[in-house]
Image (tube, rainbow, N blue to C red):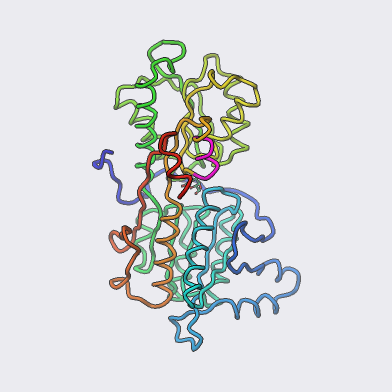
Amino acid sequence: MKMGLKKKGLKKKDPVEGVPGKRASMKEVPGMDGIFKRMRKAAAAGSVALAIAVLTGACGNANAGSEERYVRIGVSVYDQYDTFLMELMNDFNSFVDSRKAQGIDIATVVQDASRSQAAQNEDVADMIENDCGVICVNLVDRTAPTEIIDLARKNDVPVIFFNRELVEEDLMQWDKLYYVGADAFESGTLQGEMATDYFKAHPEADRNGDGSIQYVVLEGEAGHQDAIIRTEYSVDTMIMQGIILDKVGYAIANWNRAQSRSKMGQLIDSSDTQIELVLANNDDMALGAIEAYQDREIPRDEWPAIFGIDGTQVGLKAVEEGLMTGTVYNDSAGQAKAMEALAYALATGVSPADIELPEGIEMTDNKYIRLPYEKVDREKVQEYLSK
Ligand code: GAL
């Protein structure tokens, strides 16, 4: 890994774009056993009193001198159907459950923003109003955290942003703002290294023998740090390590398996040349690419090498079955553990200098916690499947 390339935080100049989308009615996040409130739905149905009553009982802040000393953590996710986030939140809930099992009165309020920043802002306002002691925010639009920051600051409620990284200037606006995630450049670099090793070990994978690798990129959302940086570092790493690349296609599939399946299908159908490599920004899109080949009944030995990132359970299974060539493990459990520990410490009033994070997890600049990525090929996959 080239540590010299390490970025401390994203800057305003990084390309950005909002994430459009409609808000569905509030639904429980799958796999969640945390408290989930249908606040807006109840309010729309004229049950304002009910929604408020439920929340008054649900949130509280050990920090606020409450006699009951209970801890309530608000969590807002950008899209409950995102596979990686689903796994992260399952892990997060297990960590909360272990604390509960130790007799601590702790619960979470989890809201799905359904890809709407306006809805997320409202949810966070509700959580703050109902005394959640800390809020974890998976921003919908990572360039638009201001309303949440202003509200949190006004009410003195710390915020842990996670997974969708806001620019450094925004995180520096207040000392009670934190970020938990990973370094996007690292995942791109590792993916590029795996693909390089694969082509060096398998010269026959250059199917037309022209000395260059015809490749396509399947990108996550426009403007997302993991999409922009993963693509850049993956491709650059391969070039720096001596692979000659020939880009024959590109599609944005918003981290989504179904979108990727259809867009990859179009790329296969329209490409004049055989695609030898698919670099997908995440596992779900790599799985969509696999399905596009299966849909066309193209024999497995004629497929390109396909690389993903995340190491979700379905992604790892595809590596185990030899369908996906490799993936890069994005440590959802580690990120969930760090976020839960930090949230608990902040909600119980531990001062930042005294926060003890789980072993192996470090905070830099009193702001950032980043978990490392790891390469996973077929040889190593069992280790990750049993994590
Ligand atoms: C990335 C992850 C993607 C998707 C995205 C959402 O880190 O690799 O699969 O979950 O976050 O922000």
Residue at 41%, 10% in the rendered image: 210
Q: Which residues are magenta?
A: 312-319
> Does 354 appear above or below 340?
below
Residue at 61%, 54% in the rendered image: 114
Residue at 70%, 66% in the rendered image: 41
> Does 16 appear above or below 51?
above
- x, y percent for residue 83: 56, 48
> Does 23 appear above or below 237?
below
Q: Main secondary structure of the magenta part?
A: helix
| Viewer-proximal residue among 314 and 107 | 314
**Quadrant location of the N terminus in the rendered image:** top left
| Viewer-proximal residue among 370 and 379 | 379
- x, y percent for residue 2: 26, 38
Counting every numbered tag in the picture gives 0
- x, y percent for residue 47: 73, 75
- Residue sticking out furthest to the right: 45
Q: Is residue 62 left or right of residue 362?
A: right
- x, y percent for residue 105: 51, 78
Residue at 56%, 61% in the rendered image: 120
Q: Image quadrant of residue 350?
A: bottom left
- Residue sticking out furthest to the left: 4
- Residue sticking out furthest to the bottom: 67
Q: Is residue 221 magenta?
A: no
